[in-house]
Image (spheres, rainbow, N blue to C red):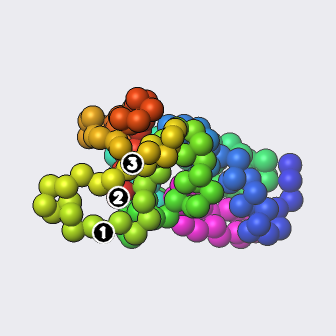
Amino acid sequence: MVAIQTRAEIQALLDQVFDPEIPVLTVTDLGVIRGVDIQPGLIRITLTPTYSGCPAMNTIEQDIRAILASTGCAVEIDTVYAPAWSSDWISDAGREKMRDYGIAPPEKDTHSKKVLMGADPTIECPHCQSTQTKLISEFGSTACKAMYHCDDCLQPFDYFKCI
């Protein structure tokens, strides 16, 4: 049992909880942890799912409870849906981890009006950094990703959609 005194200590434990769908990302990389409240004998975590139907959330909650059990404190997890999670909440370190893992990370602050005209976004290949890529499918290995193909290195890859 560990005597937890600070938010930084809880943060260090949360940095060890990985997303089951993208196992190189932690819950802190994803930006789903919205709050940590420490009270005597109780740790309350507030989190926002990446989207309301995300199948990984049950596993993430179980993993948070399991790692925080080492503190000896009761753990409460509050799920909040407002404000809705945004892919802008993914940390810069998380974006690099995605790229290194072979997933094109979502662009930050992308509110391009080109989409209204039916234009596909320009997605950089995480393998060779080429922008000569094309959308293969709106859905990749999970609903939050789309499948792309690079015309230069000929590799398929997932693109984490901007939300």
**What is the span of residues highlighted in magenta in the rendered image?**
29-45
Q: Nearer the viewer, mark 1 or mark 2?
A: 1
For badge 3, the amino acid type reads Thr
Whole-percent x, y for residue 51 in the image = 37, 52
- Residue at left offset 44%, top offset 65%: 108
The CA span between labels 2 and 3 is: 21 Å
- The numbered disc on residue 111 is 1
The reply to whether residue 108 is visible in this rendering is yes
Q: Is residue 117 above or below residue 39?
A: above
Provide the secondary structure element on which disc 3 rests: loop
Whole-percent x, y for residue 162 in the image = 36, 56
Q: Seen in the image, is 64 located left or right of residue 120?
A: right
- Residue at the disc numbered 3: 131
Whole-percent x, y for residue 60 in the image = 55, 44
Toward which corner of the image does residue 30 lie, by quadrant? bottom right
Provide the secondary structure element on which disc 2 rests: loop
The reply to whether residue 55 is visible in this rendering is no
Q: Seen in the image, is 147 located left or right of residue 67?
A: left
Residue nearer the viewer, 146 or 20: 146
In the displayed image of the protein, which residue is found farthest to the front? 152
- Residue at left offset 42%, top offset 60%: 107
